[in-house]
Amino acid sequence: MIIQPAFLIRKSVLTLLLSLPLFLFAQQRVLPLSKPPYQEYTRTLKLMGSRFDITVVGGSEAWANEKIDLAIAEIRRIEALISTWQEQSEASRINQEAGIQPVKVSEELFQLVERSIKVSDLTNGAFDITFGGLDKKIWRFDGSLTTLPDSAIAAKSIRLINYRNIILDKGEMTVFLKEQGMRIGFGAIGKGYAAEKVKGLLQKEGVSAGIVNAGGDLTAWGTQANDNPWTVGIADPGAQDRAFSWLAIDNQAVVTSGNYEKYAIIDGKKYSHIVDPRTGYPVSGLQSVTILCPNAELADALATAVYVMGANDGLELINQLNGIECIIVDEQGALITSGGVEVGVEKE
């Protein structure tokens, strides 16, 4: 058995491990002589401000590179649509006209906003794309935040965060933010959306197996070149260079949100960079949340939402959703899972 590089899943950062076993397994595939030897072709580059790894399984490098080029073009197209860093994007124009007038948008962006609002309803506001209005001067996760603001300041910092103030007009295909200063942002759903769109594009292009890893928002379909399933390692929140568990996945997305990259330690307690849009306070109590479901966009949104909701409320929600599972690591390192998933934990 030949051990190939492995995908270690972490929100917004993907680490390719060359030495750890039990992440992506491979062995020599035996094929009929009439068929070319299939291989996995991967390209890594920075897109949407994150590391992307695009892998396709195919019979020739030229064919694979052609498909990967199409994938990259699609990601760049999506970034130009939803990025709030690009002033001419549709998302930026919505923000620029907040409290002033509705903005006519493409059907694609309209539907993305519409689906985002549905997730907000589903999670009672734990997921909210209007988090872009958060006062960044109050919440700094660069090591300078040493005390929590009082409740009045926290409440003021989130006064513009309210997905119910996104007004959609399907007939006119417009999006309107009711309050001046409101901002939408797709940081908690955009990379999952991009991964899902690229997967669909590659499948239409005849790519029967592959992986799109959008900064840790991963979706996989088909099998490895050796016909084995893709096996994904879930990063240990306390040791990011190793996995605490691994999962064999088949036509699934895997997305993890955690407190291991950006956080603040206040009075000995660790607070995630994720701020609860309902309270104005950074989230504590969990180390990581991993969502497994067929759709990377939904997995991306739910990973953030469950992290904000906490273990009890989050698991109660996930256990009511068909085809969606959840793996939680709490503050003490305890592993908590939804009803339909079993996790094998790696031992030292």
Image (spheres, rainbow, N blue to C red):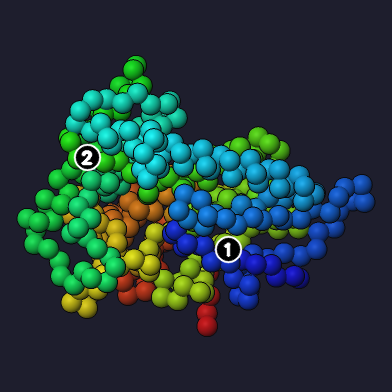
251 or 143, which is in the foreground? 143
Q: Residues within 10 Å of mark 1 (few under 14, many from 20)?
A: many
Position of 127 compared to 338: left or right? left
The answer to whether residue 277 of the structure is visible from this angle is yes
Q: Amino acid at mark 2?
A: Met
* Residue 327, percent from left and from top: 42, 61
Q: Which mark is residue 7?
A: 1
Horizontally, residue 82 falls left or right of residue 7, namely left
Element class at badge 2: loop
Image location (x, y in percent) of residue 284: 26, 65
Quote the CA–CA distance across marks 2 and 1.
37 Å
- The amino acid at mark 1 is Phe
Q: Look at the picture and state if 53 lies above or below 84.
A: below
Q: Which residue is mark 2?
A: 182
Q: Nearer the viewer, residue 259 or 83?
A: 83
Q: Dot 1: what SS?
A: strand
Quarter containing the N terminus:
bottom right
Contact (Cβ within 8 Å) of mark 2 with mark 1: no
| Quarter of the figure with residue 160 | top left
